[in-house]
Image (cartoon, rainbow, N blue to C red):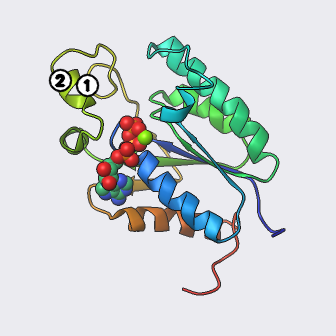
């Protein structure tokens, strides 16, 4: 495959909004199409590359800075980067945009109540009980994107629909070849 362009698809949103779920679905589809993909995800990165960091603003920024360095190297070498990080600060995301190749901001949105109801990791219950001092959306800020390239409303869409929105965007902007059969 020689018509692949590197890009950085950056999923931002509350915990439980669906960043990892959509990125996994996309990874599968892109691989099936022969695209070189690397997925960077908060959960895995925080156990390796940034395991020394916590959740203060300073540490959240450091987490994203290191990940950005990796995304920069990959995206400029033709790799499709799927990055799933809460990344709550606008200014930090602007830094990622400036550093990486073909940055595409994906706002993965679901109302806080829906994310809390999903409570995939059981963290919201603890956050609402006051047991987590810096939990995004509850006891820590989340700055919504002002002008994202893509917005997913995961409380109203299936995972397949959300992933398809991203694929369509990538095809329409020439980042991946258009699928031969529909
Ligand atoms: N359209 C959709 N897109 C993504 N997830 C969806 C959608 N509809 C329902 N869901 C469900 O929402 C949940 C999203 O959880 P997921 O772990 O992907 O969130 P996350 O944003 O990665 O959270 P965290 O920041 O904690 O890692 C899953 O249980 C998923 O099945
Ligand atoms: Mg996740």
For the residue with label 2, is its CB less than 8 Å from the closest atom of ligand 1? no
Crowd class of label 2 (few under 14; some 14 to 19; many from 20; radius 10 Å): some
Instruction: Identify the residue at image location x=19%, y=15%.
Output: 130
**Dot label at residue 138:** 1
Against 46, is 152 above or below? below
Quarter-wise, where is residue 156 in the image?
bottom left
Question: Where is the N terminus found, in terms of image quarters?
Answer: bottom right
Q: Which numbered mark, 1 or 2, is in the foreground of this view?
A: 2
For the residue with label 1, is its CB less than 8 Å from the closest atom of ligand 1? no
**Dot label at residue 128:** 2
The reply to whether residue 14 is in sight is: no
Q: Secondary structure at mark 1?
A: loop
Q: Secondary structure at mark 2?
A: helix
- In the rendered view, does 56 fall on the left or right side of 81? left
Against 77, is 165 above or below? below
Q: Position of residue 127 (x, y in %)?
A: 23, 22
Instruction: Identify the residue at image location x=77%, y=64%.
Output: 4
Q: Between disc 1 and disc 2, whose residue precedes?
A: 2
Q: Are marks 1 and 2 in contact (CB under 8 Å)?
A: yes
Instruction: Identify the residue at image location x=64%, y=34%.
Output: 96
Choose between 39 and 169: the one closer to the eye. 39
């Amino acid at each position: 495959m020689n018509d692949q362009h590197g890009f950085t698809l950056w999923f931002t949103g509350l915990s439980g909004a669906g960043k990892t779920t959509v990125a996994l679905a996309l990874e599968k589809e892109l691989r099936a199409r022969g695209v070189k993909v690397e997925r960077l995800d908060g959960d895995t990165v925080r156990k390796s590359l940034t395991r020394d960091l916590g959740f203060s603003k300073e540490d959240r920024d450091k987490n994203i800075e290191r990940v950005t360095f990796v995304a920069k190297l990959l995206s400029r070498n033709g790799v499709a980067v799927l990055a799933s990080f809460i990344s709550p600060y606008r200014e930090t995301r602007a830094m990622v945009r400036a550093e990486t190749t073909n940055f595409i901001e994906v706002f993965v949105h679901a109302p806080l109540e829906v994310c809390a109801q999903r409570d995939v990791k059981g963290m919201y219950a603890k956050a609402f009980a006051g047991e987590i001092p810096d939990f995004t959306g509850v006891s820590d800020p989340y700055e919504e994107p002002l002008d994202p390239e893509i917005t997913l409303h995961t409380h109203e869409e299936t995972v397949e629909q959300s992933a398809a929105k991203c694929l369509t965007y990538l095809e329409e902007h020439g980042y991946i070849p258009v699928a031969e059969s529909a």
